[in-house]
Amino acid sequence: DIVMTQSPDSLAVSLGERATINCKSSQSVLYRSNNKNYLAWYQQKPGQAPKLLIYWASTREYGVPDRFSGSGSGTDFTLTISSLQAEDVAVYYCQQFHTTPCSFGQGTKVEIK
Amino acid sequence: EMQLVESGGGFVQPGRSLRLSCRGSGFSFGDYAMSWFRQAPGKGLEWVGFIRSKAEGGTTEFAASVKARFTISRDDSKSVAHLQMNSLETEDTAVYYCVVGGTYVRPVYWGQGTLVTVSS
């Protein structure tokens, strides 16, 4: 099974500052045949369903603000919030959908400093 | 607009069964694989299983923790997918989400979830 490990578990960032979350997979989630990384990022607020932010590691979902960006390939990925807003307080998860069982990171809680 | 509505959650005793439904609208339901995920109270997200589209064979795969207890079916004529959960355990207590795609293909849309509580 592919294990997804996020770091840090939590971080506090000042409004307007950059937040960076890392996600590492125990095996590559890159499909060579189409050169796509089968990696998604979600935002989850209390009592709500996860909201898809990024898929294919770097493609922003329609309607997601451009302060959210994803990068990385193979086994190492990053979600960056370029200028943290109050509404970005949430838990963020990465997910690999390359291999079953699909798996998630443990989550990173983002708060305002 | 794409929508998913889960239903069928509730309170059930250990060992009993429950069937969840996921009804889609606003998209061509039969063209997509449908996945189920869950989240136990205060915990992270967990993949439960999925069903391929009929064009891809309509076959299913499951997490080891639910294999042989859970099944997934679909009725594309009604734009609905079902998660049949048998021999429920207290560890199955969670909010269950259905998702368009999400396994072997990119996730497209998540439903709002339905809570299943397994307790005596």
Image (cartoon, helix red, strand yellow):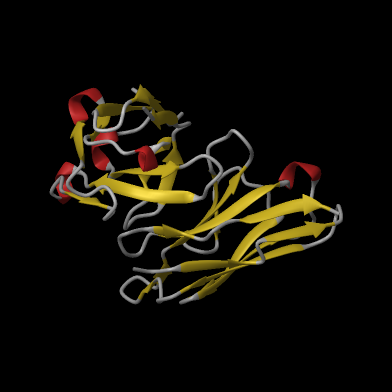
Q: How many marks?
A: 0
Between A9 and A92, the one lying in front of the other is A9
In this view, the residue farthest toward the left is: B57
Is B25 on the left-hand or right-hand side of B44? left
Q: Quadrant of residue A69?
A: bottom right
Between B61 and B120, the one lying in front of the other is B120
For the point 72% across and 46% down, the residue is A88
Rendering coords of residue A45 (x, y %): 64, 40
Note whether residue B97 is visible: yes
Rendering coords of residue B106 (x, y %): 40, 54
Note whether residue B99 is visible: no
For the point 42% across and 28% down, the residue is B114
Where the C terminus of chain A falls, by quadrant? Answer: bottom right
Work out whether A101 lies above or below B33: below
Work out whether B100 lies above or below B104: above
Where the N terminus of chain A falls, by quadrant? Answer: bottom left
Between B3 and B49, the one lying in front of the other is B49
Work out whether B20 lies above or below A58: above
Rendering coords of residue B40 (x, y %): 47, 42
For the point 86% across and 56% down, the residue is A14
Rendering coords of residue B32 (x, y %): 28, 43
